[in-house]
Image: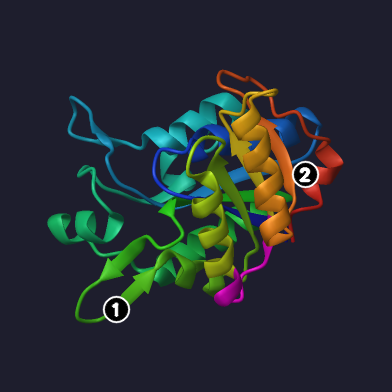
């Protein structure tokens, strides 16, 4: 059985999938057996044959050169570009968390290091109906995962990062670290954001990623140590 790490973002469009792909690629480039899994993707592209293309999962597959099929990488794929709980309601296809856990466990058994990507921020509703009220953090707790946070390096990130960390801590989810995306070394504001997040929260920023980076500048052993 492998080790796993959950990747969440401080919000939508912070580059979580981009950074996740670099994480998986970094491990694989170091010769480690690394895989990827995501419970649900919304906003998928409908292809000419009527099938749905899970862009996030397939992007990671391409960048990290994974061999799994789309069906093995993600359990639920929705076309509507809305929160997964709403997309599921629109499609009358609610997430079955027994299915998600089964698929997660299968992916975990297939790799030494499994990176599980979340949907949006940590307070993203996955299912909200008469039978179940499930937020993303509920799933993380069920799977007993620690979280690595992806945050944008720019304006507003101190607030977003601190709130995300405090929420995770309040839910008893271990915070393994932060990666700042779209970071510009030497930028006075972004350098201050880096320092203030660490000082306020005590959580280490384990790496930074610049726009267009094709590799994660982080020691593979230190990265692998974040997985449990």
CA separation, marks 2 and 1? 35 Å
Q: Residue at x 49, y 35 (%)?
A: 15
Dot 2, how many residues are within 10 Å of its Cα: few (below 14), some (14-19), or many (20+)? some
Dot 1, how many residues are within 10 Å of its Cα: few (below 14), some (14-19), or many (20+)? few
Is residue 172 in the magenta section? yes
Q: Residue at x 21, y 58 (%)?
A: 86
Q: Position of residue 135 (x, y in %)?
A: 39, 68
Q: Is residue 196 above or below residue 67?
A: below
Q: Position of residue 52 (x, y in %)?
A: 26, 37
Q: Given contact means CB atoms under 8 Å apart, are the residues at marks 2 and 1 in contact?
A: no
How many numbered marks appear?
2
Looking at the picture, tell me which residue is in the foreground, 90 or 160.
160
Kind of element beneath mark 1? loop
The residue that disc 2 covers is: 223
68 to the left or right of 99: right
The residue that disc 1 covers is: 132
> Which disc number belongs to residue 146?
none
Kind of element beneath mark 2? helix
Q: Residue at x 41, y 45 (%)?
A: 71
Q: Which residues are magenta?
A: 169-176
Residue 3 seen in render: no
Looking at the picture, tell me which residue is in the foreground, 187 or 66.
187
Q: Is residue 70 above or below residue 215?
A: below
Quarter holding the C terminus is bottom right
Q: Position of residue 66 (x, y in %)?
A: 59, 32
């Amino acid at each position: 059985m492998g080790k796993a790490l959950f990747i969440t973002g401080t919000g939508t469009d912070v580059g979580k999938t981009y950074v996740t792909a670099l994480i998986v690629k970094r491990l694989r480039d170091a010769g480690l057996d690394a895989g990827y899994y995501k419970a649900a993707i919304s906003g998928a592209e409908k292809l000419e044959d009527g099938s749905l293309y899970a862009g996030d999962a397939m992007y990671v597959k391409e960048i990290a050169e994974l061999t799994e099929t789309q069906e093995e990488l993600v359990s639920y794929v929705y076309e509507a570009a809305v929160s997964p709980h709403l997309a599921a309601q629109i499609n009358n296809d609610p997430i079955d968390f027994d299915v998600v856990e089964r698929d997660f466990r299968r992916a975990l058994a297939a790799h030494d290091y499994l990176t599980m990507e979340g949907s949006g921020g940590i307070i993203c509703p996955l299912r909200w109906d008469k039978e179940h009220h499930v937020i993303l953090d509920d799933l993380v707790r069920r799977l007993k995962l620690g979280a690595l946070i992806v945050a944008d390096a720019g304006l507003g990130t101190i607030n977003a990062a601190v709130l995300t960390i405090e929420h995770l801590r309040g839910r008893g989810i271990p915070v393994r670290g932060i990666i700042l995306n779209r970071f510009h070394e030497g930028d006075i504001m972004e350098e201050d954001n880096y320092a203030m997040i660490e000082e306020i929260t005590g959580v280490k920023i384990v790496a930074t990623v610049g726009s267009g980076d094709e590799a994660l500048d982080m020691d593979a052993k230190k990265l692998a140590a974040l997985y449990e």
